[in-house]
Image (cartoon, rainbow, N blue to C red):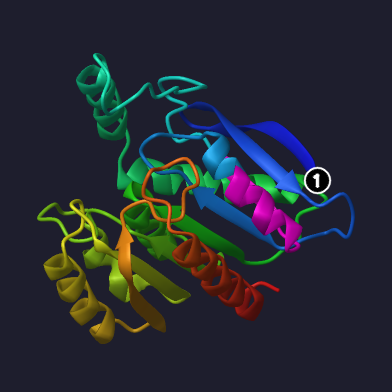
Amino acid sequence: MIERELDIATQDGALNTYTVRPDDGGPLPPVVMLMDAPGVREGLKEICRRLAQSGYYVLLPNLYYRTTRAFALGPTRDHPDAEANRAKMFAMVGSISNDKVAADVGAVLDSLATLPDARPGKIGLVGYCMSGAFVTFAAARHADRVGCFASYYGTRLITDKPDSPHRMLDEITAEGYYAFAEHDTYVPLSDVTAFERLLAAAPFPSRCEIEKGAHHGYAFSDRGTLDEAAREKHYERMLSLFRRHIG
């Protein structure tokens, strides 16, 4: 594996981005992974490496770059600083938006032309937790450049705000895959059911699944909710989607 950090120019500064690809075999189909609320960390890089082993050039941008190049989340449970650490994390989440992240994805897409090991053409896009909303919004905003996208236990897919991702579904053309946990305090099953109805009426091909017995964060090795079977299924579904649409 070849791992590098790139600085990608945006209108708001340098977007530091972790990248990983196989040692040879390029140019490779690009995959852009959007982080969850705790930020870029080893647990996400581990997933990036797994995708790279399957033949992809994977980019993981630090969406908090406007504030910090390296957000380190302290303990959020069973620790004297847990409440303060959670507050810091949610403050970081509040510092970004669907529009900002869509612009960042656009900058990453533009940068691919400068990367000889990235194959020209449409990309695969994947997001977790808060980035389920971001990948949905970005798939609409960059419909001509996104070949497919996946969202895992995505939050805030339906809100009462003008930029709610569900309002963008009619603009998406790529195939989308959505997976939710059966037990999720952030995304109750009633929200999943409401979103499934909207997906059924949307013009793009999609699939939505609920992981029985799983909890929010089930694909992360650094979370107490890791579910090995659900984690492997998450890879299988994602790789099948990517192979069909970006190679």
Q: How many marks?
A: 1
Q: Is residue 144 visible?
A: no
| Membership of 191 in magenta stretch | no
Q: Amino acid at mark 1?
A: Met
Q: Quadrant of residue 242?
A: bottom right
The segment highlighted magenta reads 46-60
Residue 209 higher or lower than 219, as above or below: below
Q: Mark 1 falls on what kind of element?
A: loop
Residue 197 higher or lower than 133, as above or below: below
Report the residue at 51% width, 70% height from top: 233
Report the residue at 39% width, 80% height from top: 206
Q: Mark 1 — residue?
A: 1
Quadrant occupied by the C terminus: bottom right
Q: Position of residue 152 (x, y in %)?
A: 39, 60
Left or right of 155: which side holds 5?
A: right
Q: Is residue 168 visible?
A: yes
